[in-house]
Amino acid sequence: MASGEPRAKKLRLTDEKKEKKTPEKKTPEKTPESSRKAPTKLGPNSLFGMGNPLLDISAVVDKDFLEKYGLKPNDQILAEDKHKALFEEIVKKFKVEYHAGGATQNSIKIAQWMIQDPHKVCTFFGCIGEDKFGEILKQKADEAHVDAYYYEQTEEPTGTCAACITGDNRSLVANLAAANCYKKDKHLDLKENWKLVEKAKVYYIAGFFLTVSLESILKVAKHASENNKLFTLNLSAPFISQFFKDALMEVMPYVDVLFGNETEAATFSKEQGFQTEDIAEIAKKAEALPKVNKKRPRIVVFTQGKDGTIMTKGGDKVETFPVLKIDQKDIVDTNGAGDAFVGGFLSELVQDKELEQCVKAGHYAANVIIRRAGCTFPEKPDFH
């Protein structure tokens, strides 16, 4: 689960020490074997993401709190009216941790973490409210070294996702609020913002954003296609393929890399009339769907939890990559695994690494994230 007068604000640097860059000479250490392409030198705003920003509010709560708001110990729901007071109460009553969240922002954040230097390789657009939670979200995005340009408005409060922890269980309550209010003409179309879109060479949007601003997605997707850049999309959830099928298929001709998990793939297959439940076959059929930019074959990447990740290789070829082994007792929280996989994948893709290396990076990032509560990570990755 994941997400007034507009102001396109650039984030201030809040921690100058954190912004000091590691010497450039360290970069070659990450260069893969000579059989692979040398990584491209990264500049700011090379990877662009747009989606539903949510401030993740995480706290250990008691059973009385769950019962008060009618929550199950291990669940994911969208907030209803009866949950509105929950977000203020959890902050007042319990010790909370804040993180920049929402599916796309999670992936962008992890990509930046994997890249490390330079900072602000990753750009993120989304809508927040002009409020306390919005200020915290900006601060958290800045701490993650993501170049976040939020559309700020006063009609709805900043989107939040409360993670109510009891023992080993996490009950997630998401209130999209402002995330639903993104406006193409008020933000994406602004000259200074569109310049940031033009600077990017890889674009990523989770399917959830199809419910918010199809026109914004299409503008970015068409720009990528017309300029032979990489546009990537995630199926995100079964309901996207079911209830937003028309919007999804309007964007699909521009998709260079399609992500999803086995459940989302199966639903997509059913809705498209593929008449197969075989994930590899679904990947092939998804790859073969009409595509505008003929210079690139579509790549389809379907994760399957602890089972191998399936990726199309062009033509009729499909390859399966085993995931990193992990002891069941070391798994803390699998909620952010999919977002983490995409973030790891994108961190290598934006450096022009081979696709196999992208999958390995995805597996590594997911393996790190499921050992921790929420979509959080240690200070530095240990990926080579």
Image: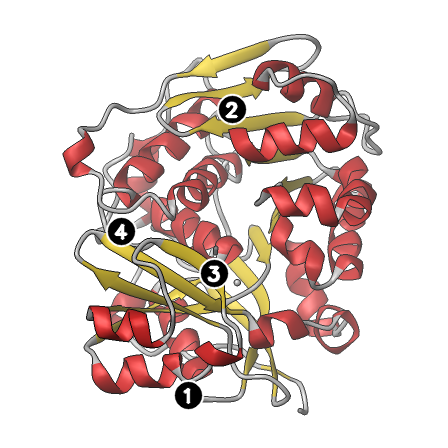
Instruction: Give the number of the mark in front: 3 or 1.
Output: 3
Q: Which residue is mark 1?
A: 132
Residue 154 screen position, x and y as percent: 61, 90
Crowding around mark 3 (Cα neighbors within 10 Å: few <14, some 14 to 19, many 20+) is: some
Q: Which residue is mark 3?
A: 77
Q: Secondary structure at mark 3?
A: strand
Residue at the disc numbered 4: 377
| Circle nearer the N terminus (4, 2) | 2
Mark 2 belongs to which amino acid? Leu
Percent position (x, y) of residue 187?
Answer: 70, 74
Q: Quadrant of the C terminus?
A: top left
Where does label 2 land, which residue? Answer: 355
Q: Name the residue nearer the viewer: 359 or 41.
A: 359
Q: CA distance from mark 1 to mark 2?
A: 41 Å
Mark 3 near mark 1, Cβ–Cβ under 8 Å?
no
Q: Earlier in the sequence, mark 3 or mark 1?
A: 3
Of badges 3 and 2, nearer the viewer stands 3
Q: Is residue 339 above or below residue 86?
A: above
What's the amino acid at mark 4? Phe
* CB-based contact (under 8 Å), mark 4 and mark 3: no
Badge 1 vs badge 2, beta-carbon distance below 8 Å: no
